[in-house]
Amino acid sequence: MGGGKIGMQSLVVVGPAEKLAKLREQAEQQGEIRIIEELDGNTEEWMRIIRKQEETLTMLLHSKREYETMLNSTHDAIIGVNQEGIITLFNKAAERLIGIDAVQVLGTRAENSIDNTRLHIVLETGQPELNQEQILPNGTRIITNRVPVRSETGEIWGAVAIFRDMTDVMTLVEEISDLKELKSMLQAIIHCSDEAISVVDADGIGLLINPAYTRLTGLAPEDVIGKPANVDIFDQESMHMRVLQTQKPVRRKPMKVGPKRKDVIVNITPVMVDGHLRGSVGVIHDVTELKVLGEELEKARQMIRTLEAKYTFEEIVGKSEPMHIAIEQAKTAALTPATVLLRGESGTGKELFAHAIHNESERKYNQFIRVNCAAIPESLLESELFGYEAGAFTGALRGGKRGLFEEASGGTIFLDEIGDLPNTMQVKLLRVLQERELVRVGGTKAIPVDVRIIAATHVNLESAIRNGSFREDLYYRLNVVPIHIPPLRQRREDIHSLVGFLLKKFNAEYGRNVEEIDARTLTILQAYHWPGNVRELENVIGRAMINMHYNETIILPSHLPSLSQQAKTSAELTQETQANAEGTLKEAMDEAEKSFIIKSLAACKGNRTQTAKQLGISLRNLYYKLEKYCMAELEEES
Ligand SMILES: Nc1ncnc2c1ncn2[C@@H]1O[C@H](COP(=O)(O)OP(=O)(O)OP(=O)(O)O)[C@@H](O)[C@H]1O
């Protein structure tokens, strides 16, 4: 019989004396049990002690369970060895990590059962080995602490290794360093972005802005970060707050921001993480530059289009008196906003004059649009000129379309062949001229128009009025500054300089080197009656150059065979006419009279009373002569 102590606990063992003696011996050898008392045969006392010892045993078992459960449920692997290096502890995590069951290694020497263990070395040295990295044979990367277990007196009782799998940790470390890298990259991107960026948290408190934001809004980080975004740069309800409340993004919202009220496009997106609102990110795109670029592009476009009005007065050849008058009238008209009506036969240069007037006017940097009223089908003319609203007719563009009048806004519209304008269009044009506004096809809204009108016609409008094909009221609206461009046969002295001009032009176009026109050829040209005017002269010279060999440099009569033939006929005719002396004199006198009247009219700026006075004839007589020489339509300059 005997009693003993394990740690702080007492243990009473009852049994046959022999067995007890053996147990005592073992216990004493292991140093675990110390005999503290011996009792005589007092049964009651024995029973009390036994009960007490049973309770203690139960508690011990309980503690052991707790201890085992704890050791087995920890994530860290634990291996313990006793003084002899025998494995006494091998928890579940150790089984998992090393891949060996505890029963296989418990009771064996650690260095025999576990590869690369250093527990026996720790036992030997008594030195702890902390935070040691090690790769297990199965490739698992671990970090381990090996420490000696000492008694209260410092004696080494054993050693313990506690280690854990670092694979997850290393993965986490790698992920964290990736995240750090990503964060630095994002910061760099945000920092050097030209888009103004701002970030707020879920409560609308400013978290981040970039330098572009400061440049655009004038707000420094200290004005924004940590401050509520309840009133923002737009002096309105904060867009960030709206996004946080609705949790819906704001896309492409045009706004004006900053002290300079710059035009911007705002995009704000809520930031959701796992379904939870974490804040919002705003990106503001400054479109001021784009707008300026757009405007410059538009200007460039307009200039290109203006270049379509390619001729200037310098390119109008003609020093003859009637041509000089027409050019001077056109130059004067160019400086006013007045409507110009160019009259003259086909090919006399009406379009050339229209270009030159536009290019001399203050509208020269804006559009010059030519509309050939005779060439556009009547069904299309109205929508082409005045545009149409959406859905005005089948096939109309969805957003409607601006008409040529709107396109020419700020510039000039050249209405060529106005004499061929259909009657219905004449009414509409009259309205534009009177009201300076138009209504698109299918629309109701009056759109103001700021367009200078130059009209041209080869038709005798006065007789068109008489036969009812042209409206008189429109005629008066158009006939503000009428300019009569004389036919070529009335200014034969211009033919030589026109030929020189055309030679240069075609030499450049065809890569030729034709220098002059033979005197006989010029006589033929001057004798011809030129029904097609300068356009016809252009064709004749062009054809002549094609007929010439490359080494020929002078245009001879043989280069214009058809014309030589006609000229001959007309020369013969002239000879015949010359036989009739009366007729020739009359013609010469008429020609002289007409040219004298034109000069006087030009000197008096078209004022008939003054012209009549200067000519010394009655006003009535002047009107008669103007009618006779088809100059009745010439009007006084305004
Ligand atoms: N005075 C001029 N100097 C140089 N070229 C001229 C002159 N007059 C006309 N031309 C040229 O003659 C051609 C016909 O001129 P333009 O088209 O201006 O005539 P138009 O009177 O408008 O003819 P249409 O009535 O048939 O439209 C053009 O190539 C033009 O450049």
Image (cartoon, helix red, strand yellow):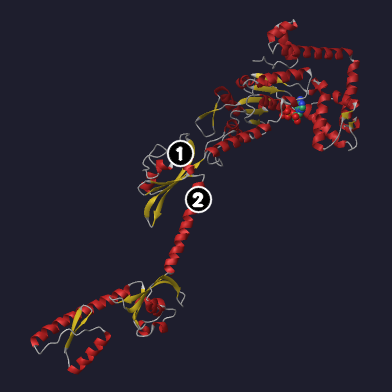
Quarter location, residue 370: top right
Ligand 1: does it lie within 8 Å of the C-beta at label 1?
no
Residue 337 position (above or below residue 151): above
Residue lying at the far bottom in this picture: please name it: 18
Q: Residue at x 90, y 19 (%)?
A: 576
Say which of 21 and 234 sits in front. 21
User: Can you give x and y, in whole percent of width and height, for residue 624 in the image?
Assistant: 73, 11
Mark 2, secondary structure of its residue: helix
Mark 1 neighbour density, 10 Å: few (under 14) some (14–19) many (20 or more): some
Residue 556 seen: yes
Q: Which amino acid does label 1 sit on?
A: Thr
| Residue beneath disc 1 | 217
User: Residues at badges 2 and 1 in contact (C-beta under 8 Å)?
Assistant: no
Q: Considering only order in the chain, which callout, 1 or 2, is on the residue closer to the N terminus? A: 2
Quarter location, residue 30: bottom left
Mark 2 neighbour density, 10 Å: few (under 14) some (14–19) many (20 or more): few
Q: Quadrant of ligand 1?
A: top right
| Residue beneath disc 2 | 188
Quarter location, residue 523: top right
User: Can you give x and y, in whole percent of width and height, for residue 613 in the image?
Assistant: 72, 5
Residue 548 position (above or below residue 335): below
Say which of 148 and 221 sits in front. 148
Q: Residue at x 16, y 82 (%)?
A: 53
User: Can you give x and y, in whole percent of width and height, for residue 101 in the image?
Assistant: 37, 82
Does 296 sit left or right of 129 as displayed?
A: right
Residue 532 seen: no
